[in-house]
Image: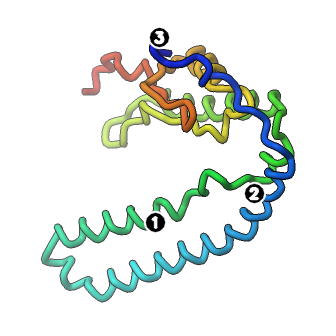
Amino acid sequence: MHVYEDPATWTPERVRPKGQLIARFVLTVLYTPVQIVMWIVALVVFLAVGLVTEIITVFSTSYEQGLFKAMDRVMDPLSKWPKWCVSWPELRHEGDSAYYRARVEKKVGRWTKKASVPHRQGKPRPPVECAIPLRDYRGVGGWYVAQVAGAQGWELRPTDVRKEVRLWWSAASRVDGLG
């Protein structure tokens, strides 16, 4: 944590009213099929455009790269839930700090397992940065994420704890001889 950051933001989020959670959950249930249909339609459109313009992509790599960038810009937001969505576990466990502690430990443990895999020649390097979203630690606060991550070898990156806690795998800075 940096000294200049407000310590009040590292505390658990306030418990949301049950009525608000239920309304958000109902809206999530109604919105999810719409989001899935939009994702499928966007995928079909990009596949159709890709098939129609296959001849162009053979001769132009910049067109292909542009098509992939456009696809990423459209598909990435459609593959994530909006921040207002509430899942069934969030509805059931709102205010349960033990549930959120376990959730943070599981998430950080998964990232630690991915990051600690030794690098092998010809394979992509393991991830050295990650972000734990607010949805995973809202009941315990960002300070708990920092505590758990620090114990597993992670360092904090500049972060907006109201959205996510960004971490960096400190073991990645050592020289491993593989270049």
For image coordinates 64% across by 35% down, the residue present is: 107
Side (left or right) of 96 relative to 118: right
Quadrant of residue 106 within the rendered picture: top right
The image shows a total of numbered marks equal to 3
User: Callout 3 environment at 10 Å: few (<14), some (14 to 19), or many (20+)?
Assistant: few
Which amino acid type is shown beneath numbered disc 3?
Answer: Val
Q: Is residue 22 above or below residue 32?
A: above
Side (left or right) of 122 relative to 131: left
For image coordinates 30% across by 17% down, the residue present is: 175
Which residue is disc 1 drawn over? 75
Most extreme residue toward the left is 59
Q: Is residue 164 above or below residue 177?
A: below
User: Callout 2 environment at 10 Å: few (<14), some (14 to 19), or many (20+)?
Assistant: some
Which amino acid type is shown beneath numbered disc 1?
Answer: Met
* Numbered disc 3: secondary structure: loop
Most extreme residue toward the bottom is 52
Label 1 or label 3, whichever lies nearer to me, is 3
* Numbered disc 2: secondary structure: helix
Looking at the rendered structure, which numbered label has been put on residue 24? 2
* Numbered disc 1: secondary structure: helix
Quadrant of residue 7 within the rendered picture: top right
